[in-house]
Amino acid sequence: MKKTIFLVMGLLCLASTGFGQTEKEIKPLYIDGVLPNLTFHNIINYKDSIATLSDFQGPQYKLVVFDFWSTHCTVCIGQFLKDDSLQRAYKNDLQIVLVTDQPKQLISNFIAKWEAGHHVKLSIPIIVADTLLPKYIRRYFEPNYAWIAPDNRMIAQTSENFVNQQTIETLLKEMEKLKAEESIAIKAIHTAPAAKSHTIKQLPQ
């Protein structure tokens, strides 16, 4: 009986310590830092309301670009058509994801009005009411783009000036090299909560 009590107490202490450490260990990433396979809730304009980073990457191991924005950022909104065009052009290799900390209903109404005004159905998923990604990715400005490689490394953080065909083509070529050279490692990453760092050329500044 005593052994059972001590075992239960020990497990509770271990669990408590583990949870505390997990929260404390979350630090914003620098370039080449690895983003865990996070689960995102409150997603609109997507096939599911909940998805992981791996879901966005898909079986093709797409390049994922998180676009941090808000409704009061006119530059952010001005990028929507460009982002949407790039997403459609590179749909098999690229996944742009809009991210905002603003509430779901506000964003849903805003996007509906934007689509009606531009006669376009936005093809990009939107994570709303988000409080998770800012723990990992610093927001230096808006719009702020975080580029995530197939091995879950953040390979660049840029302004909207780098979001163009030339940048995407350059990075996709590097992604193909990475996937060809380290396909086994990348597959392992997508079944684990965190990833191992690999070397790849950084986006020229």
Image: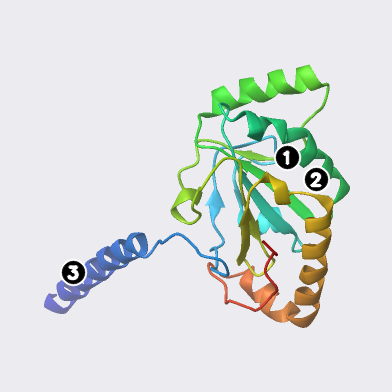
Query: On the image, numbered disc 1 is attached to which residue?
Result: 124
Hey, what amino acid is under mark 3?
A: Met
| Quadrant position of the N terminus in the picture | bottom left
Residue neighbourhood size for the residue with mark 2, other residues' Cα within 10 Å, grouped as few (<14), some (14–19), many (≥20): some
Q: Which sits in the foreground, 32 or 59?
A: 32
Marks 1 and 2: CB-CB under 8 Å?
A: yes
Q: Residues within 10 Å of mark 3 (few under 14, many from 20)?
A: few
151 displayed left or right of 170: left
Which quadrant would the C terminus be assigned to in this image? bottom right
Q: Mark 2 or 3, which is nearer the eye?
A: 2
- Circles 2 and 3, Cβ within 8 Å, touching? The answer is no
Q: How many marks?
A: 3
Q: Nearer the viewer, mark 3 or mark 1?
A: 1
Residue, disc 3 = 9
Find numbered disc 1 in the image and state the secondary structure of the residue it sits on: loop
Of the two numbered discs 2 and 3 on the same chain, state the one appearing first in sequence: 3
Q: Which residue is mark 2?
A: 87
Q: Residue at x 24, y 66 (%)?
A: 12
